[in-house]
Image: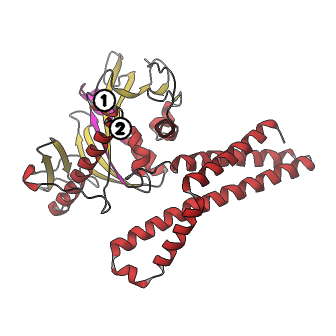
Amino acid sequence: MRAETEALVEDIKRSVGLLRRHLDFDASNARLAELNALAEDPSLWNDPQRASKVMQERTALEDQLNAIGRIQQDLDDNVGLIELGEAEQDQSVVTEAEQALQALKAEAARRELEALLSGEADANDTFLEVHAGAGGTESQDWASMLMRMFVRWAEQHKYKVEYLEESPGEEAGLKSATVKISGRNAYGWLKSENGVHRLVRISPFDSNARRHTSFASVNVYPVIDDRIQIDIDESQVRVDTMRASGAGGQHVNKTESAIRLTHIPTNIVVYCQNDRSQHRNRAQAWDMLRARLYERELKIREEKAAAENAAKTDIGWGHQIRSYVLQPYQMVKDLRTGVSTSDTAGVLNGDLDPFMAAALAQKAFGGGPESVEDVD
């Protein structure tokens, strides 16, 4: 076996070992047995909410434990194929097995990172907002590109996307938009995208073909469930009803059903217009407000250790978390982790996993590049 292949096998074995420790393999198997017993108890279904939580936990835990066993089995099978191919001098078998090991390494690394998503709300669905910065049409078009990027990422990971609000720009793009992304660990993965995103390109709206810099901010906050209690004094919330705006169709409507809630003590504003029913929009808006207040509390806790929220103080220079340069060269660079790629088209089509994984690993293990230079 080649030295490179031996190193690859050792990497996968290391990831499997870390996965077992992160999950506390024996304790997780014991918990799965408890959940299976609960699921077989007919009385569980007398409480649909509790039953739903039990089934979700069981499915997630079963998936994690089965993945460890499957990765280990696939590793053994492919090592065996390599040994067989080398013995029979069949290079095609060896090459195919080595390619399978490369894919297995990527999966093991991702599973290893997912095991670190142990925050109180990491496993939850998430709300994601995009707001255009100063700059009119340029920034509004960039906000639209960002929202498309996140929707593509969500679709690639089989997450459900629901549009809650869209405020179109005067000429093109979006002033703001909010979506709900549903799926296990949606918040855990997307929370690293909080902050200001910077675009450098030749403007399609500039007749002189000059290079422009645009900014847009992304806010991510978890959908909270009955495990997390958030109490709101309704007397401190201003409720406004208005006509929905936007392009219509499946995302928004043009009836007097849009709801805006303003939490006066914090000046947090949420807006929902996705449904033709004012009642349903109102309920969704209250869920969004509770989620925003919970996310605010999480940030306050984190800021006691590090000023992580500084990136959201202004949508402009000096506060961006990532730069997307399309001219005069092609480069996307994360300014926190130093991860970069020249595949700008891939990133804008949703290939965000390397950036999210690096941000998660940096938060979990610390470290990162000693110096991160901006790109221009």
> Which residue is at 79% across, 44% downward?
95
Task: Give the structural element (helix, strand or loop) at label 1.
Answer: helix
Residue 163 x, y percent position in the rendering:
30, 51
Task: Point out which mark residue 310 bears.
Answer: 1
Q: Tell me which segment is drawn in magenta.
A: 122-147
Quick check: 102 above or below 184?
above
The answer to which of 102 and 70 lies nearer the viewer is: 70
The residue that mark 2 highlights is 194
On-image quarter of the C terminus: top left
The answer to which of 145 and 103 lies nearer the viewer is: 103
Quick check: 154 above or below 134?
below
> Which residue is at 34% across, 20% downward?
212
Question: How many callouts does the rendering have?
Answer: 2
Q: Is residue 80 left or right of residue 287?
A: right
Q: What's the CA distance linking mark 2 and mark 1? A: 11 Å
Q: Quadrant of residue 286?
A: bottom left
Whether 125 is among the magenta residues is yes
For the residues labelled 2 and 1, say whether their Cβ atoms are less than 8 Å apart: no
> Which residue is at 46% across, 37% downward?
363
Whether 171 is among the magenta residues is no
Q: For the view shown, which residue lies furthest in the left direction?
A: 235
Q: Is residue 65 left or right of residue 131?
A: right
On-image quarter of the N terminus: top right
Q: What kind of residue is marked 2?
A: Asn
Q: Earlier in the sequence, mark 2 or mark 1?
A: 2
> Which residue is at 31% across, 44% downward?
298
Query: In the rendered view, how is the structure colored?
Result: secondary structure
Task: Give the structural element (helix, strand or loop) at label 2.
Answer: loop
Q: Is residue 352 left or right of residue 14?
A: left
- Marks 2 and 1: which is nearer the front? 1
Asked if residue 252 shows in the view, the reply is no
